[in-house]
Image (cartoon, helix red, strand yellow):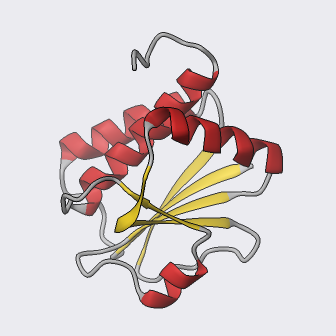
Amino acid sequence: MRYRVVALGGGKMKSAALRAACDDYLSRIRHYAKIEEREVNEARIPEDSRLIALARDGEGWSSPQLAELVGRWEMDGRDVAFVIGDADGLRPDVLRRAERTWSLGPLTLPHELARVVVYEQLYRAYTIRRGEPYHRG
């Protein structure tokens, strides 16, 4: 199983601080799972991947709920692709294809910051599943 975080808009991260935060969490996650990041202009998700679209009107998950989902996804073994939209959000066809839609909350976040939150929450999910002290609830 592999995670893919797909950021639409095609541009590289402009903020060195947010890039550093992403890289830090990516290195932490790689102790538990395979993960890659893609910056693209158009969402090209392999058909056999589970698509999780990030959208303001999606489901809000607590960290323990995400940890439970991660456990189910690992058992299933299918790749998981998280798609983060550009300034205009995600196209309707991407949202329709999504197996689930995840909301990071009602705030509008820049895609760079949303990426940091996704990585941090994936890392937290793994530490919750392993009973490691990072998550204090």
Horizontal and vertical percent position of residue 52: 54, 64
Q: Observer-nearest residue: 83 or 73?
A: 73
Task: Work out whether 3 lies above or below 25.
Answer: below
Task: Work out whether 89 lies above or below 135.
Answer: below
Give the residue displayed 25% in from the left and 51% down from the top: 113
Horizontal and vertical percent position of residue 4: 57, 57
Give the residue displayed 49% in from the left and 80% down from the top: 95
Quarter of the image for residue 14 reads: bottom left
Q: Observer-nearest residue: 92 or 28?
A: 92
Quarter of the image for residue 47 reads: bottom right
| Side (left or right) of 4 relative to 113 | right
Horizontal and vertical percent position of residue 127: 54, 22
Q: Is residue 15 visible?
A: yes
| Side (left or right) of 93 relative to 16 | right
Q: Observer-nearest residue: 103 or 1?
A: 103
| Side (left or right) of 59 relative to 80 | left
Give the residue displayed 29% in from the left and 38% down from the top: 20
| Side (left or right) of 18 relative to 3 | left
